[in-house]
Image (spheres, grey):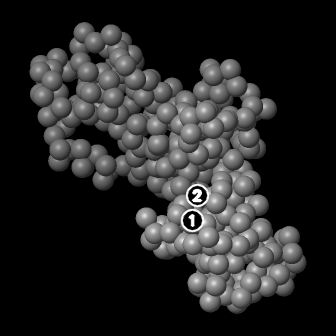
Amino acid sequence: MPNIEVNGKSYETDEEGYLINLADWNMDVAQYIAQTENLNMTDNHWEVINFLREYYDEYQIAPAVRVLTKAIGKKFGPEKGSSQYLYELFPYGPGKQACKIAGLPKPTGCI
Amino acid sequence: MSDVKKFMFVNRKAPHGTIYALESLEVVLITAAFDQDVSLAFVDDGVFQLKKGQQTKGIETKNFSTTYRALEGYDIEKLYVEKESMEARGLTEDDLLVDVTVLSSKEMGALMDEQDVVLSF
Amino acid sequence: MLHIINKSPLSNSSFNDCLRVMDKGEILLIEDAVIAATKGCALEAKTREALGRFKIHVLMPDLEARGMADRVIDGVSTVDYGGFVDLVAANKNCQSWL
């Protein structure tokens, strides 16, 4: 099992870099994963990451992109509820990439 | 649209004892991406899948019962529970964690009959 | 609609559940469910009654495997694997009562 090293602490991940234990997540780990993805985390990024974590906490799944887009628009305003906005933040996919940074499993049905 | 088919997922197993309930739920979530006419039926012990207050810490498994609440966000809003099964288990609509339509056995049977595809779990 | 049942009606409720929920259609009994199609089984009366509402079929290879091919209830039709496929093809939809 591959590991990542953050602040001298080791965290287990799968082959694709997703955290194995949800409870391992913290902002430093998120920042580290974002760096490996060449992402510069802004407030807008954190807004989505925190939303994903809250969604997972409530429903025990990572939402499909379509569902995430709709929910983000509802919560943060229609200008943010578009897949264009989310893909600009997370070029490799708001599902795949954002979930990785949020320390969540890949969304069900995500390919 | 003529290519929209009526899919029904029939859930007849209690959760946690076997993998059926969780597998069904995952397939339902994936199916939601295809814009079909999806309905979920809860019959026999399948009614237990929707019971409020499930706590799985003690058996160290995922508590996927809260995921049924996410279905609405996936535009899956046709959830049917068979009245006879619910009552035989001492349950009422108030015991269920989502809004459902309660049908008699015969109504449920008729609804199954009119589906294009029925998937059983 | 075709209903496929594969569990013994004496230890699993699928056969009864199907009869409760559905009021018409075709039933195919396979694997351990084939005993529901046999004379002398505790379910015989129930199966005979169901014949008024359903066409009932039973899979011959499964009956033979259990040594029960000589006691099929009158009115229940026996099918081979080809007949199984024909039934699935002839019905608009089908459900396996797991």
At x 83%, y 81%, the residue is A43
At x 56%, y 39%, the residue is B60
Q: Amino acid at mark 2?
A: Asn
What kind of element bears circle 1?
A: strand
Occupied quadrant, residue A84: bottom right
Occupied quadrant, residue A68: bottom right
Q: Is residue C13 visible?
A: yes
Q: Chain of mark 2?
A: A
C17 relative to A79, above or below: above
Q: Which residue is mark 2?
A: A21
Task: Report whether B72 appears left or right of A103.
Answer: right
The residue lying toward the viewer, choosing from C59 and B61, is: B61
- Residue B74: give its label: none
Q: Chain of mark 1?
A: A
Q: Which residue is mark 1?
A: A11
Q: Is residue B81 visible?
A: no
| Labels 2 & 1 near each other (Cβ < 8 A) | yes
Occupied quadrant, residue A62: bottom right
| Residue A95, image x, y percentages | 62, 74
| Residue A3, image x, y percentages | 50, 69
Judge the density around disc 2: few (<14), some (14-19), many (≥20) Cα neighbours within 10 Å: few
Q: Residue furthest front?
A: A8
